[in-house]
Image (cartoon, rainbow, N blue to C red):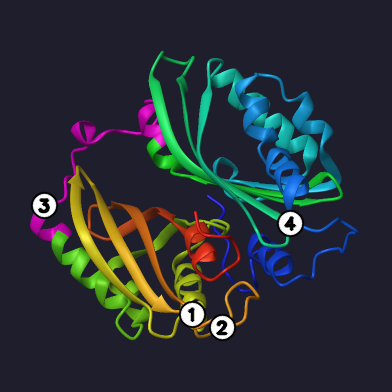
Amino acid sequence: MNVRRLSAIPSVLLAIFLIVSGVSAQSNEPACDGDYLESVRELGLTYIAALNAHDLTSWYNVLADDYTAYYAEEGYQPLDKDAALASDQALLTAFPNIDTEIHVSSVSSDCRLVTFRWTSSGTFVGNGNAVSVLGMTMVEVADGQILNEWVTYDVGDLMTQMGLMGTAEETTDAISQEAAQQFADRFDAIFDGPSLDVTDEIFADDFVAHLPLAPELDREGWKAYVASFYAAFSDLTQEVNEVIVAGNQVVLRVTYTGTHDGTLFGIPATGNAIVMNGVGIFTFNEDGLAVENWANLDVVGVLAQIGVFPPV
C-alpha cells in the first residue's frame, strides 16, 4: 500500500486553500443573487442528476477542460475529467439501479462553491447486496462550468455492505469493550493540548488513515492533519460520545468544539464558535494497536459556521 507522508500540503487541501481564499482564477460572473444563484445550485447538482438518470453525458459536458476530481473511493487522489468519468461509469456498472437523494444543498456567498449532502442506495451486482451510504459533495463553479469536485463518504462502510470487508461476526481477533474504552480514553488525550505523541502509543507503525479532504495518510501525516486544525482553533477540544465494538474494529462517535481564532483553509479568523460532529472507525492488529482509520467529519458544516456557506 502506498502511504504518503504529509511533508507538503496535500493537493486537495491546497485546492481548498486556493478556492476559499479567492486565489482561484477570476471570472466575470454576475452578482450572486436571484436566478443566477439558483442556476449555480442546479449546475452543482448536475452530477447527482446524471447518476440518477444513469447517463453521465450531461455531467461530462459541463466539466472544464482542466477539471479535477477528488473521490473518496480513489483515495482522494486527483483525477482529470476522463479519469473521473471512468470512475463514475464503474460505479454505475457496479450499481445499475443507483438512486441518490439530496438532503440539503447550499451555495457559498460568492456563488463559487456548491455543497450538498446525500444518501445513495443501490444493489451491488457482484452478489445482490443492498447498500446505502451517506456522503457529502462540494463543487467549484465558474463561467457555467465545474472546475473542481470533492466527494467524501465512508468507503469502509460501503465495502462492508458490499461484502468485500469482513463483518464483526467474521472477525476472530475481537477487541474487548474494556480495551476499546481504554483506547477511546487515550485517543481523547491526543486532543488535550494537543498531545500528538500519544498517537505513537496507540497507532501501529504501519497505521493508515483515510480522512476528509486529504490523501491517504500515515501516522505522521495524521498528526499533521490534526495539528492543522489547532492552527485554526487553538482551543479545539474533543469529546467521545459513544464507543462501539465490532470484532477487531472500534467505532467512535465524537464531537469537536472550538473558536475560529486562526486561519482555516485560507479563511482568516472570525471568532465564531464551531461544533463539528464526526465518526471514526479504527481497525486493530493482534497487538491491540490501531492499523487503519476511516473518518467522516462534518467539514462542510464547519465552513458554514465560519461563514463560507449560508446556514442550512
Q: Which residue is mark 1?
A: 260
Q: Could you say whether the residue bearing mark 3 is in a helix, strand or loop?
A: loop
- The image shows residue 118 at horizontal and vertical percentages of 50, 38
User: Is residue 177 within the magenta segment?
Assistant: yes
Q: Are marks 3 and 1 in contact (CB under 8 Å)?
A: no
Q: Nearer the viewer, mark 3 or mark 1?
A: 1
Q: Earlier in the sequence, mark 3 or mark 2?
A: 3
Tell me which segment is drawn in magenta: 158-180
Q: Say which of 25 and 307 sits in front.
A: 307
Structural crowding at the residue carrying mark 3, measured as other residues with C-alpha within 10 Å and reported as few (<14), some (14–19) or many (≥20): some
| Res. 308 image quadrant | bottom right
The reply to whether residue 79 is in sight is no
Three-letter code for the amino acid on which mark 2 is drawn: Ala
Q: Are marks 1 and 2 in contact (CB under 8 Å)?
A: yes
Three-letter code for the amino acid on which mark 1 is drawn: His
- The image shows residue 138 at horizontal and vertical percentages of 62, 50
Q: Which residue is mark 4?
A: 112
What is the spatial separation of the Cα atoms under label 3 and label 1, in whole angstroms? 37 Å
- Residue 38 vertical placement versus 10 (above, below): above
